[in-house]
Amino acid sequence: MNDYIELRLDVEQNGQADSALMTETVTDVLAAMLAEEGFESFCPDEKGLTAYIRKEQYRDEAVRDILGNIPFENLTVTAKAETVEGQDWNSEWEKHYFQPIVVGDRCVIHSSFHTDFPDCEHDIVIDPKMAFGTGHHATTSQIIEQLLDLPLRDKSVIDMGTGTGILAILAAMRGASPVVAIEIDPAAEANARENVVTNGHPEIDVRLGDASHLNGLQADIFIANINRNIITNDIAAYATALRPGGLMLLSGFYEHDIPVILEAAHPLGLAELTHTVKGDNWTCLVLRNDK
């Protein structure tokens, strides 16, 4: 089994008015820069970022170059790298986090190593490995609930930032076609490819990339479960890929972030239909393309 390097980056603001927002922005940029150097998975938090890369791919000089070229002022980032010995990642998920989950009494999500789970209308198998998106987080479960209630038969769907592919898989199970799933993290994209095949939907078009890969695509339903900063930065591209009258399901942010999202959405002809709230004020915002 492969050994990994766990790189911890702690971000310290120097006189920033909104340190939480700044940290989120910085970790987004750091994750993108690290992904270019082969880092596979990222766990941001309120203090910084934890990232993982296979040990044989890790280079101290690459990390130093990244930290020396962060495009922000008045910022201090400290780094600490430790080796994580090879292990059975599925076993680690089973022991520490990923247990079967039922959403809306209609969808069960479990891994291939689970044996005790209920029968549901939609049975999704997710082996997350080093990628994230199992349905446990309030943002994912809220979008799942929306997808369970929407008429998806023969509707085209784009899932931006697909992660494990869970939302794209559910859409395909409910009759959506075609379904395109886009992911910027190479490890997550590879994991999504495995999961769509495992669930019997190899027709899902899984692509590696960012919002630039939306060029020429059109969808009736557009999904983005990412974070506020990426959504507001890319929402114009999202809107271009959404057909008139189409719905946009957005999550990955808090209820108090909705006005910021709407400020960016309204000039694009996107209007709020509804939103839901779960857990620690995580929200799912549903917009309609009124153009």
Image (tube, rainbow, N blue to C red):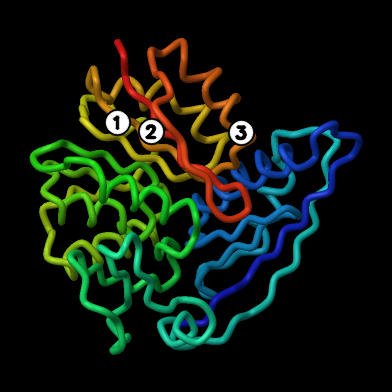
Residue 211 - label:
2
Give coordinates of residue 127: x percent, y percent: 33, 73
Report, in whole angstroms, how far the alpha carbon at label 3 lies from the one at label 2.
Answer: 21 Å
Query: Is 251 displayed left or right of 201 in the figure?
Result: right
Residue at numbered disc 3: 257
> What's the amino acid at mark 3?
Asp
Identify which residue, 26 or 230, lies in the foreground. 230
Work out whether mark 3 precedes mark 2 in sequence or the reverse, and give the earlier one: 2
Question: How far apart in space, not on screen, are marks 1 and 2 (Cα)?
Answer: 6 Å
What is the distance, in whole Å, between disc 3 and disc 1 at their CAs?
25 Å
In this picture, residue 28 sits left or right of residue 207? right
Instruction: Name which residue type carries label 1.
Output: Leu
The quadrant where residue 165 appears: bottom left
Q: Residue at x 37, y 24 (%)?
A: 237
Circle number at residue 214:
1
Q: Which of the image's four quarters has the N terminus?
A: bottom left
Q: Nearer the viewer, mark 3 or mark 1?
A: 3
The outermost residue toward the front is 105
**Position of residue 122 measured from the top left corner of the image (x, y, whole percent):** 20, 64
Q: Position of residue 126 (x, y in %)?
A: 31, 70
Residue at (56%, 36%) from the top-left corner?
A: 228
| Total numbered badges shown on the rendered structure | 3
